[in-house]
Amino acid sequence: MAYTNTVLNRARARLSQENERKRAEYEDHLAKAYALRPRLREIDRSLAGTSARLAALIFQPGDPQVEIARLRQENLALQDERQWILDEAELPDGYLDNSPVCGLCGGSGYRGSRMCECLRELCRQEQKRELAALLPSGKERFENFSLELYPDRYYPELGNSARALMQKNLNYCRRWAQEFQPGVRSLLFSGATGLGKTFLSGCMARQVAEGGHSVVYVSAGKLFADYEAVKFERAEAESLRDYRDCELLIVDDLGTEMTTEFVKAALYELVNGRLLAQRTSLISTNLNERDLEARYGGQIASRLLGSYRVIYFLGDDIRRRK
């Protein structure tokens, strides 16, 4: 599963720090053990020279097997003595353990060309940490989505109540997030302010991230500010790569930004590019279908309304009801 550069770099940094921490701990323990029992240093030097001594035997005339057997016995005796010294010194178990932080990849984070589970787990943790910092309330989970906040009265134009509609939306979105696979159809949340679009998109972000997928959550204002920073060379173009390449991009509150011709061009590039690359997006907006076309033009509105599944939100402003 592909993670964004931001998440991957943080995970790699943590793995590197853990490797360095373990190496420093081993060297500290080894120095203390040598100071406590100087004979350990002599034994380790002898054992470390075994490879060179074996190589020298190969180039000597005659059959080296006798000398190799003698060297093996000598090494075994040194190892026994070393273990006896450690036991006698009553050092804790694993005190001189020099194994890598991960036995599968040796602490590199990769097994061949594939990411090792140790690095993948760090990526999952960094993904969750990043989302926790970005999501508004920190409570964005499906079990916290309250249908009681939506009126149960009948809407003639809907043929049902807002609560019944939101129950269907909740069921669909929960299943969508739980079963998420890269390339699944994108979603557009549409409805007036204060109807839970941001909260529900946050629930979905957490669920998809917990499934091990790369998720980027950003407000429309921040998104276009980043595009403008690149345009005016205040940032590297690579800063936009996460928006283009993540498995799920969530853009909150489209329509609240200052909409300029530059913003329209950036939005078209992002929406169209992700559609062509079959990467999934979730966009929330207070704008209805007519307003989307009026603000962004027919090309963008056509892609959002035609290629995305539109999820409509109805009810009363939740913030006011609370």
Image (spheres, rainbow, N blue to C red):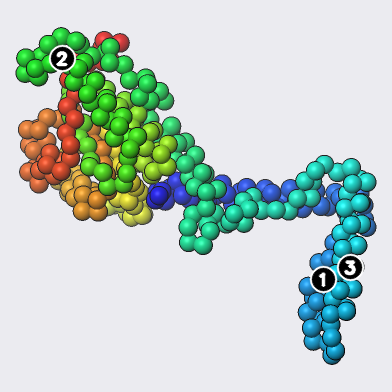
**Which residue corresponds to the image point at 90% horizontal and 73% vertical from the top-left?**
70
**Helix or strand or loop: what does disc 1 sit on?**
helix
Residue 269 higher or lower than 69, as above or below: above
Q: Position of residue 181 (x, y in %)?
A: 32, 44
**Residue at the spot of label 2:** 161
- Residue 79 in the figure: left or right of residue 302: right
Q: Nearer the viewer, residue 41 or 137?
A: 41
Q: Earlier in the sequence, mark 1 or mark 3?
A: 1
**Which residue corresponds to the image point at 81% horizontal and 67% vertical from the top-left?**
48
Displayed quadrant of residue 39: bottom right
Displayed quadrant of residue 107: bottom right
**Helix or strand or loop: what does disc 2 sit on?**
strand
**Helix or strand or loop: what does disc 3 sit on?**
helix
| Mark in front: 1 vs 3 | 3
Q: How many numbered callouts?
A: 3
**Residue at the spot of label 3:** 73
Q: Position of residue 3 (x, y in %)?
A: 41, 48
Q: Amino acid at mark 2?
A: Ser
- Residue 137 in the figure: left or right of residue 305: right
Q: CA distance from mark 3 to mark 2?
A: 85 Å
| Mark in front: 3 vs 2 | 3
